[in-house]
Image: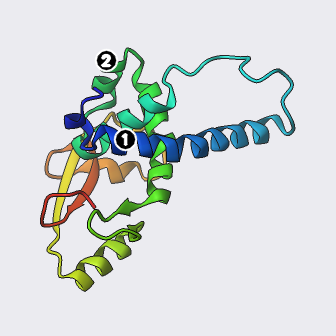
Amino acid sequence: MSHPAFYGLSHHHLGELIAELAPRWVARCESGRHERREGDRRREAGAGPKYELVFTDRLLVTLVHLPTGLTHEALGVLHEVGSATIGRAIRGVRPLLADRGFAVPDRPGIRLRTLDDVFAYAAAEGVTLRIDGMETQVCRPHAGRPGRRAFVCGKRRQNTVKTTRINDGQGRTL
């Protein structure tokens, strides 16, 4: 799973991404724990349950899931963990990637963080965008959940999550 064909980055770029995002992830986890405890640590650092997936695996799982839509169950089988663990890993890493934004390869210093940034960049540079929509079948949400009807696809008559991916003319995901 650590082959660049799965996640579309070179090993060098993946190493830079890990070095940039790992401290933010650790700080975010520790901040969440501090809020739940309502104070400082009561035990030494490293005590308590261990993560089933280290940060590198969490990042790889997210980088594979986002462009391919590979299900949490399939990713769980590859990493020998449950689908809930994969879901938590993706939910923890996606905000870090979104805050970081997409770096345009030919233009250092430009980061596309929002959809408006992508469209403004495309208009300014004359880039043709390709928009790809995809539906992934999911389990039916529990009764009484807000937006439960939003998961129903009229065409397929199944419960699905809709995702959209935008690529530039060279096929790079923006």
- SS assignment at label 2: helix
Q: Picture coordinates of residue 99 (x, y %)?
A: 50, 58
Describe residue 161's horizontal placement relative to residue 83 as left or right: left
Q: Residue at x 72, y 43 (%)?
A: 31
> Which residue does the numbered mark 2 point to in the structure image?
77
Disc 2: CA contacts within 10 A as few (<14), some (14-19) or many (>=20):
few
Q: Picture coordinates of residue 16 (x, y %)?
A: 43, 45
Residue sitting nearer the eye, 81 or 40: 40
How many labels sit on residues?
Answer: 2
- SS assignment at label 1: helix
**Amino acid type of the residue that numbered disc 1 sits on in the rendered structure:** Leu
> Which residue does the numbered mark 1 point to in the structure image?
14
Q: Picture coordinates of residue 172 (x, y %)?
A: 20, 58
**Amino acid type of the residue that numbered disc 2 sits on in the rendered structure:** Val
- The residues bearing labels 2 and 1 have C-alpha atoms spaced at a distance of 23 Å
Q: Picture coordinates of residue 111 (x, y %)?
A: 40, 67
Q: Residue at x 84, y 30 (%)?
A: 41
Compared to residue 47, the image places residue 156 above or below, namely below
* Colouring scheme, one of rainbow, by chain, secondary structure, one colour: rainbow
State if disc 1 and disc 2 touch (CB < 8 Å): no
Disc 1: CA contacts within 10 A as few (<14), some (14-19) or many (>=20):
some
Compared to residue 123, the image places residue 65 above or below, namely above
